[in-house]
Amino acid sequence: MSSAASPPALRRFLDNLKAVPRQFRASTIRGGMPQTDRTRSTFVFGNVFLHLHAVRTHRWSLRWSTTWGLGITAMAAFLITLVTGVLLMFYYKPYPEVAYLSIKDIHFVVPTGRFMRNIHRWAANVMVVAVILHMARVFYTAAYRAPREFNWLVGMALLVTTLGLSFTGYLLPWDQLAFWAITIGANIAQSPREVTDALGITEYFDPGGLQKLILLGSDQVGEEALIRFYLLHVMILPLVLAALVAVHFWRIRKDGGLAKPADADRRLGPPPPDTYPVFTEAPSRTYHLAAIVRGKTPAVGVGPEQTVPSMPHLLYAEAGVFMLATFLCLALSLVSDAPLKELANPGVPENPAKAPWYFLGLQELVSFSAFMGGIGIPTIVLVGLGLIPYLDREQEGTGEWFGGPGGLPLVLTSVIVGFGAAGGVEAIAIRFGWLREWFPNIPQLVITAINPGTVLTLIYGAYSTWLVKRYNSTRAGALGLFTCFLCGFVLLTVIGTYFRGPNWNFYWSPADWPHH
Amino acid sequence: MTVTPGPARSRLDPEPMPRRDFLGLASVWAAAAASLLSLVGMLRLPKAAVLASPSKKFRVSLPESLPEGAPYIPPGRTVALFRDSKGVYALSLVCTHLGCIVKSAGDGFDCPCHGSRFAADGSVLKGPAPRALPWFKVTGMAGNYVVDEDAVVPQGTKVAV
């Protein structure tokens, strides 16, 4: 017999059944809806995906001009490529000729296939652009400085992985565009032979040949290469990228959030009156972190008054950027189709054979010397970028756009120098040719050492060394050098994209290309 | 309470390294070395021992009507054969710069990818190509020949017709 205090078991069962939706919601969002200061905190740190965020965010970090949302844009583009990529894998078959036909199927037969492929392709482009712009943002706001040196390196690894993902994806359609771009890329990997051949040691020491062999699994682009690129594209590189992204985000938080000027609080002024006051409710737990955290933490000596709860302020902003990025990819996909040329023909190259647009600056350099353009100068640039946060130990201008000695005027001057030098060197090479045309019997090593690419690098290096002396500041030199290389990259990419025609000759317009 | 001194060792006469530390470090380094070695072992797998590409040695029949100095390109190959009064010879059509296929144009070859130009004997005239187009070994006679793309011969080596 049941007691009078509790209803019969069947009644309780029905009550519980009715309560399932409410109880289910309560069990998923622990701590209740994010309506008070405390429940908003619980909302963030009680969720495995959100707890990479700090519970509260500084108002400086939420200004549009602090980040322009570029990092989140890159992440959003990555997620979009992930989803559309998995969808494309339903139909894609990584085997020569079959691959081409399956892409054709995806384009013409598969429901929404063309749209998904377009989105995948455009999101990949958006990702490359966002990553480059994000890097420029971090550089120009001097946000790489201590304690964020390591995260700058992780970011560089992410840039390289992003380019690797794009490059490996480029081969998969197995059309003429893909085949010849990858043939050129694989031979760039082999280009250390340019030096070892000139020294006559290739027989004993052949890093170039080894790189190409590992990359292609053969001595030419074929079925082995396609499987390898597919494996890299859908498995190895995405895993690497995901791991690096996790470290990157984690370090943002552990390095004290986004960089901001030392006097950010004063510049922001008092918080708006409607800001929910901090610590009106006693914390339900205390963390004795002081015992295990050492060193200069960003929160020392600063109250939480200039911070706002990450939920909703930061999370809504992120969601907004995410939606904008998605909208951008969708809009571009509706306007422009991903290209698909004829089936790959190993006997007849495309003329001109062009790599993806973000590699056309490199292709321009490669057209002077394969080794210096494809490996030498990129290595110099990467090593230089990696050293920046370790060489620039200054404080002035952290967290400010174009912060540091010289500031914006120096950057603008460097834009002129960067474009001017690149344009000048290119003009000479295009108008008068280079050493081989002047001295037909010149040794290859001389051309490898002295070509438009290395001359340009030297000019940039000399200019930034002069800046270091002129302003007595490493940051000034870095500002100049970074700006110069960025401008050089842009100019070479534009020349490679729009002004190179058949036989890589210079043409003012594709209308001037010879017909044959 | 009296303090009884322990054995005569430790602070005043420390061992260079305590046994446990030594064993610990030795095991860490052994594990690191083993991981490195296994990584090298794993990297042996993607380094192909047999290449999937077609045989580098192939037979070719030169058409009787082939004019002097005109290239004959066997189907599916990137080699051009020529016949002149001194004999038959074969040149690679793979650009020594970045592996595009050069095109016979006028008295020489043009590379479509980065504008290298080669003379009729394969020497570099212009552009980024670091080396001349290699000549391959040709054997045979009377219109039937075998070309070996693995055997590079000096420029000007021709087999008598």
Image (spheres, coloured by chain):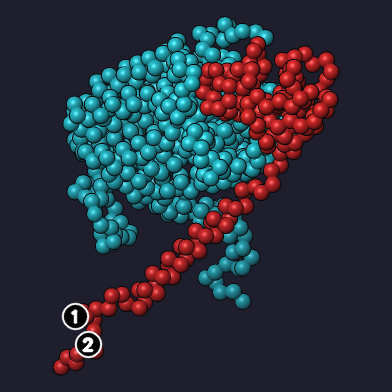
Kindly identify which numbered label has been placed on residue A132: none
| Picture coordinates of residue A202, whole percent (x, y) | 53, 40
In the figure, the shade used to draw chain A is cyan
- Residue A312 against residue B119 in the figure, above or below: below
Helix, strand or loop at mark 2: loop
Q: Is residue B55 above or below residue B41?
A: above
Q: Residues within 10 Å of mark 1 (few under 14, many from 20)?
A: few
Query: At 32% across and 40% down in the image, what residue appears?
Result: A387
In the drawing, does residue A109 fall left or right of residue A184?
A: right
The residue nearer to you, when weighing A394 against A49, is A394
Work out which quarter of the rendered image holds the N terminus of chain A and state it: bottom right
**Which subunit holds the residue at mark 2?**
B
| Residue A172 on image: x %, y % | 65, 34
- What residue sits right under mark 2 in the picture? B8
At x 41%, y 40%, the residue is A155
Q: Label 1 to label 2, Cα distance in Å?
A: 8 Å
Q: Give the x, y percent position of residue A394.
A: 21, 38
Q: Which chain is red?
A: B
Q: Amino acid at mark 1?
A: Leu
Quarter assignment of residue A332:
top right
Residue at image x 23%, y 81%? Answer: B10
Q: Are marks 1 and 2 in contact (CB under 8 Å)?
A: yes
Residue A499 visible: yes
Assign a secondary structure to mark 1.
Answer: helix
Instruction: Give the vertical position of B80 relative to A244 (above or below).
Output: above
The residue closer to the viewer here, A496 or A27, is A496
Q: Say which amino acid is labelled 2.
A: Ala
Q: Check residue B12 in the rendering and tell me which mark sits there, or answer none.
A: 1
Q: Quadrant of residue B52?
A: top right
